Image: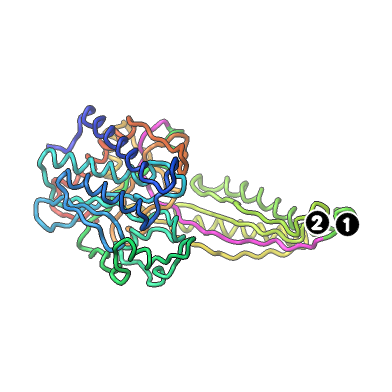
Amino acid sequence: MALRLTVQEAEQAAARVMARCDALAAISATPGQLTRVYLSPEHRRANLLVGDWMRSIGMRVWQDAVGNVCGRYEGQTPGAPALLLGSHLDTVRNAGRYDGMLGVLTALEVVAHLHQQQRRLPVAVEVIGFADEEGTRFSVALLGSRGITGQWPAEWLARTDAEGISVAQALREFGLDPAAVVEARRAPSDICAYLELHIEQGPCLEAADLALGVVTAINGARRLHCTFSGEAGHAGTVPMGQRKDALAAAAEWMVAVEAITRTRDEHLVATVGCIESLPGAVNVIPGEVKLSLDVRGPQDGPLAALLTQLLERAQEICARRGLGFASEEFYRINATECDADLQQRWQQSVAAVQGRSMALPSGAGHDAIAVAACWPVGMLFVRCDRGISHHPAEAVSQTDVALAIQAYCQTVASWENTDEPAAV
């Protein structure tokens, strides 16, 4: 018998998820807002609440050495590799209530349905609420997911928050041992695949009038500090043809960044987000401009080619205007491809519940980036209102969540009759 939910069962499950999202949103460090950061009292309360929900559906529950809350629903054979489901429970400051939490709570509904039917799969099913995806407190992200993959560099323990509290001190205050963070690492044989459901955090599904979409890849990113160096001068005495105006050159380049990127693959994006003009006086020609460049895309090759073209255009503009240009890369993360087999499983389930499946990349980062270092990953996106995220106005509909739970159950059910526990 296939692991399918009726429309009524899915609506009831979605109603529970929406109510639980509200309950988690009430666990906040800031009254009237949602802020829940790593190793805080609110983190502890959220873990305890989610742990209670896990136990109520027959899961064995524990908190690991970096603060992830974990639950296991055993398979047909005790100790079988686990299909890992989940997302994160931490938030940005003044957050929405679905980013991360929706993925954890819909995963619990999949297990709840298994438990209600008293069914076991050839694989175990584990649900994880990752402790820190956002990096809000210590300005380093994916601490929870990098914990289970053994990617925790020792120097992270010395990082401090705005109050000067180190990660090591925060771990101790939380009741964890900084020397034991390596114990959070899971053996490669423990897990066969990772599935993550997440709000899209963008407008593409809404534009396509679809509730669900299958993620092809998580965008890689390059971030650079760029400087245009000209010559400051008197705004009233230097003729226009003799100026070396750094701001005019930067403005020409910013327009070119937009125009060039629009001619490339639709999933490539480039953004100039910060700009500083010096000396910054109304009657002085700008002599130097500092700005940022953020370039993202789902494939590293096209991303690198776009970045090269953008930097070459900056050099061309400066050569023509008699200015200097310099750039320094300060952040790089490669694109993360979602596993082809897991994409197919998601696509079949999505097509079954909404008629057709849409494939799209993720422009935002997720725990799946870290998990992909060790196991195959697959992601499902759920439409969110106007694409708004990291904001109190973040919203999803209960009807869309019901469809997502139906697709989630069918995808997990695809392991039901497999002879091999792994999805590789």
Principal SS element in the magenta part?
Answer: strand
Quadrant of the drawing holding the C terminus = bottom left
How far across and down, in percent of the image, does residue 322 sit?
78, 62
Q: Identify the element where label 1 is drawn.
A: loop
Q: What stretch is highlighted in magenta?
A: 209-232
Crowding at dot 2, Cα within 10 Å, few <14 / some 14-19 / many 20+, comes out as many
Q: In this view, does 199 lie above or below 237?
A: above
Quadrant of the drawing holding the N terminus = top left
Question: Residue at (23%, 65%) from the top-left corner?
Answer: 187
The one of 366 and 420 positioned closer to us in this rendering: 366
- Identify residue type, mark 2: Ile
Residue ID for mark 1 = 238
Query: Of label 2 and label 1, which has the lower sequence position?
Result: 1
- Identify residue type, mark 1: Val
Q: Decide whether residue 399 is among the magenta residues.
A: no
Q: Do the residues labelled 2 and 1 touch (CB within 8 Å)?
A: yes
Question: Residue at (84%, 60%) from the top-left corner?
Answer: 233
Residue ID for mark 2 = 285
The one of 362 and 119 positioned closer to us in this rendering: 119
What's the CA distance linking mark 2 and mark 1? Answer: 9 Å
Q: Identify the element where label 2 is drawn.
A: strand
